[in-house]
Image: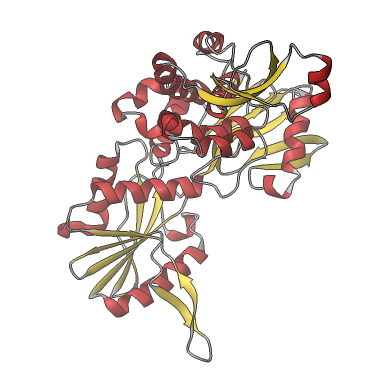
């Protein structure tokens, strides 16, 4: 069973009173998620609380796939204040797939922009299964790679090397059995064991029939029982296994629940979860690098300046804005914020005052080496925040732009709109 929800959704037990705004899980599934939420590493993903005697889990600002027993929970980004209809969920899924395309360790980059709306009709588990099977199909059609393993046996004929020095008493008792050691070619190697174990994780869903066909073609290959050890062996395999390299990124999350690329560490639950703040930052940076005018220089996480110096004059506290764009004598310092803000004056935009102080510190440092500095806070575009307002000013030389990022648009169109808002007549 697959549930599609958004950030900040509530999970509860099935036996609790029905509320359409809540996802009701079997008690055993809820208790597993609760145990995870009560761990230190799970606090940001799921928050456990009790209200009026009823237990809840609230999903944090994460997106991706969370699995528990036979239940898959697809967590989508919240890009509208009230995301609930099928159309809104489909749009949120398109936005998530579009952002996931920039994670280099994952195969979402293989998804063409033109297919995203078509794939949004499927849940994330089905999209992931489809991507995985596209790669697995190529391996199976070419034929799984074999490898040599050393085999020790007792045979009635000589094969390989005789091993008379081993257990001579057995040779005296059974002279017709010759202890030999030889190399045998087999498909039971670490890469193939990992492939089968990953396929077994995808047996549920729209692609289940294809998965079963592939598994039947691997009857002679045991599934990996220790994926970490097999992955280490597979990465050391010879060049004949180069076609399997795409598999290494899938193994940690399919078999261990560790999402690569966007998150440090991983979730101990089977799934693939990404912190939306980090994913949003990666997506914006990647799009700017690719689609800004060619005379723009784009740097990410630039650590050029420090906030202050200690009594000896040594710099302390590096300043690392998300993106810095240079064009001519103008510098744009951009910071991405995964928050929903609303139209109106600053008091009602839900803008964190700390973010404003942070941008001011950036501006003061970058003013020393540029003729003009423009500060930019980037937020996801919503129905209540569609157009960038006129800039605010720390002072005459330091404007602050609040700019929506349209996640529903193709990357090139999104960047063009963003650049028009912050560059004006210079763009």
Which of the 4 image quarters holds residue 38? top right
Nearer-the-camera pick, 276 or 133: 133
Tell me, yes or no, if residue 7 can be seen here: no
At x 41%, y 43%, the residue is: 384
Side of 410 where 166 appears, left or right: right
Indicate the position of residue 304 as horizontal and vertical percent values.
38, 72
Indicate the position of residue 238 as horizontal and vertical percent values.
46, 35
Which of the 4 image quarters holds residue 397? bottom left
Nearer-the-camera pick, 368 or 340: 368
At x 25%, y 41%, the residue is: 412
Nearer-the-camera pick, 185 or 249: 185
The residue lying furthest to the bottom in this view is 312
At x 47%, y 72%, the residue is: 318
Side of 91 where 169 appears, left or right: right
Indicate the position of residue 274 as horizontal and vertical percent values.
53, 41
Tell me, yes or no, if residue 306 can be seen here: yes
Colouring convention used in this rendered image of the protein: secondary structure
Q: Is 73 situated above or below 413? A: above
At x 49%, y 10%, the residue is: 210
Side of 395 where 160 appears, left or right: right
Q: Is 309 situated above or below 104? A: below
Q: Is 85 situated above or below 250? A: above
Q: Where does the N terminus fall, quadrant-wise?
A: top right
Side of 227 where 396 appears, left or right: left
Q: Where does the C terminus fall, quadrant-wise?
A: bottom left
């Amino acid at each position: 069973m697959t549930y599609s929800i958004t950030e900040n959704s509530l999970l509860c037990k099935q036996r609790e009173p029905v509320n359409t705004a809540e996802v009701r899980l079997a008690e055993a599934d809820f208790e597993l998620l609760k145990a995870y939420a009560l761990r230190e590493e799970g606090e940001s993903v799921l928050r456990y609380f009790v209200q009026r005697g009823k237990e809840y889990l609230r999903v944090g600002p994460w997106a991706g796939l969370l699995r528990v027993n036979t239940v898959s929970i697809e967590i989508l980004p919240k890009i509208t204040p009230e995301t609930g209809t099928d159309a809104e969920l489909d749009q949120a899924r398109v936005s998530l797939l579009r952002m996931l395309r920039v994670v280099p360790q994952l195969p979402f980059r293989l998804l063409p922009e033109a297919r995203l709306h078509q794939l949004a009709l499927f849940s994330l588990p089905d999209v992931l299964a489809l991507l995985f099977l596209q790669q697995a199909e190529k391996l199976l059609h070419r034929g799984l790679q074999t490898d040599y393993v050393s085999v020790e046996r007792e045979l009635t004929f000589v094969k390989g090397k005789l091993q008379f020095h081993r257990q001579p008493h057995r040779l005296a008792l059974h002279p017709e059995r010759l202890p030999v050691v030889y190399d045998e070619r087999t498909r039971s190697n670490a890469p193939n064991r990992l492939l089968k174990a990953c396929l077994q994780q995808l047996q549920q869903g729209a692609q289940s029939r294809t998965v079963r066909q592939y598994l039947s073609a691997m009857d002679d290959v045991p599934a990996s029982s220790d994926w970490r050890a097999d992955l280490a062996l597979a990465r050391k395999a010879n060049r004949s296994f180069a076609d399997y390299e795409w598999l290494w990124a899938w193994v940690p999350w399919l078999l261990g629940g560790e999402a690569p690329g966007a998150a440090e560490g991983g979730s101990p639950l089977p799934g693939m979860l990404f912190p939306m703040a980090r994913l949003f930052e990666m997506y914006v940076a990647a799009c700017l690098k690719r689609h800004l005018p060619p005379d723009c220089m784009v740097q990410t996480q630039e650590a050029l300046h420090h906030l202050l110096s200690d009594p000896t004059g040594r710099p302390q506290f590096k300043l690392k804005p998300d993106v810095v764009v240079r064009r001519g004598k103008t510098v744009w310092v951009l910071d991405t914020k995964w928050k929903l803000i609303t139209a109106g004056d600053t008091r009602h935009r839900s803008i964190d005052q700390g973010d404003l102080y942070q941008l001011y510190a950036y501006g003061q440092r970058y003013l020393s080496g540029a003729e003009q500095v423009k500060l930019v806070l980037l937020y996801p575009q919503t129905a209540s925040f569609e157009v960038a307002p006129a800039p605010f000013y720390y002072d005459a030389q330091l404007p602050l732009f609040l700019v929506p990022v349209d996640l529903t648009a193709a990357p090139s169109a999104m960047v063009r709109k963003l650049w028009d808002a912050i560059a004006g007549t210079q763009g």
